[in-house]
Image (cartoon, helix red, strand yellow):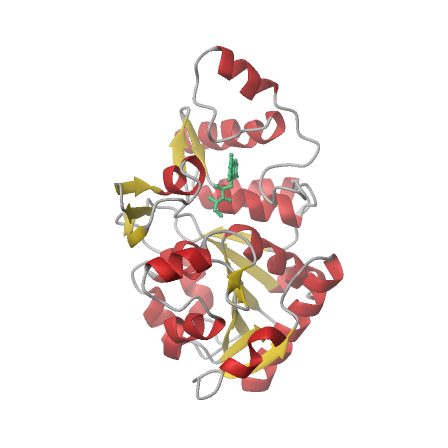
Amino acid sequence: MSILALSGGVGGAKLALGLSRVLPQADLTIVANTGDDFEHLGLSISPDIDTLVYTLSGLANPELGWGRRDETWNFMETLTTLGGATWFRLGDRDLAMHVERTHRLRAGETLTEITDDVRRRLGIGPRILPMTDGRMRTRVHASTGWLDFQDYFVRRRCEPVVHELMFEGDAQPQPEFLALLADPALTAVVICPSNPFISVEPILSLPGVRDALHACRAPIVAVSPIIAGRAVKGPTAKMMTELGLDPSARAVAEWYGELLDAYIVDHADAADMDGLHPRITVTKTLMLTLEDREALARVVLDAAASVR
Ligand code: FO1
């Protein structure tokens, strides 16, 4: 069995963890959104890769969903006394990841090589692939003008009204990612319950990815990131409203359109699914416990098997 999961943000990492626990580790490859990446304090930061790495290694901060557990903040406290930028919080342990990644990138290593070495060092079985080793950055056209992603998401706490998103860069998809999509042995593609616009669309917007997904023989299954009109975490529902979409599980399925073979929604949204293209599976999609993550992963894999 060979499963490819597309993931960004905290929700995506939760399902990726569930998949990693119900599959043989070598059967799972996770493609991480890198549209959130940015340079900050001279460091190259890849939040969605790190959220996956920390979540799959058990190092993630359970309260925040990002960064590390058991963190200390001496660097941030000291930076404040020096007048440095502290709006993007970097814990002392997390800082080592950014310093080492920056050092290796400058030494000529690719983000793929660095990420693969880190996941091995942290004992993570599944492969984690950046969506690209090139530069592709999410930009947000808000009421206040064009913003870099983390400026919108963290510094301004997603408060500006979003009119448009843009994925800026000339990046090509990570080659192993494209090769997997063309691999006849691929069993399923899982679109995790990530924000469709800021976590999944950057991946789909890379040249050739949509075509490769449409040509892919494996079923494509998505999990709704919306439950009863609300996002589990983050600005998905607010963003949908601002982009003129109904903040509903149905509207997310309509947004993905013909791409999906199957769609997993929560019981709260089951009545709103008539006439949609993908085969609908209704289950509990809120993942509060590890068992929830594993159970949802099994439902996703069963849904893929039923449309294969
Ligand atoms: N999110 C916040 O809301 N505030 C932060 O200070 C913050 C710091 C941070 C540091 C490292 C990292 O990997 C992620 C961090 N995040 C923070 C989350 C990050 O902005 C988001 O996880 C993604 O960019 C969107 O999913």
Q: Residue at x 50, y 47 (%)?
A: 48
Asked whether 237 or 73 is in front, the reply is 237
Asked whether 60 or 160 is in front, the reply is 160
- The quarter of the displayed image where residue 67 is located: top right
Asked whether 108 or 86 is in front, the reply is 86
Q: Is residue 139 visible?
A: yes
- Give coordinates of residue 129: x percent, y percent: 49, 52
- The quarter of the displayed image where residue 123 is located: top right
Looking at the image, how many numbered discs can be counted on the residues? 0
- Give coordinates of residue 301: x percent, y percent: 62, 74
The N terminus lies in quadrant: bottom right
- Give coordinates of residue 195: x percent, y percent: 46, 58
- Give coordinates of residue 117: x percent, y percent: 57, 41
Q: Residue at x 68, y 62 (%)?
A: 293
Position of 254 relative to 19 (above/below): below
Q: Residue at x 49, y 71 (%)?
A: 249
- Would you say 161 lies left or right of 264 here? left
Asked whether 301 or 36 is in front, the reply is 36
The C terminus lies in quadrant: bottom right
Position of 231 relative to 120 (above/below): below
Position of 201 relative to 255 (above/below): above
Q: Residue furthest top?
A: 82
Q: Residue furthest bottom?
A: 275
Q: Residue at x 44, y 52 (%)?
A: 33
Q: Is residue 308 visible?
A: no
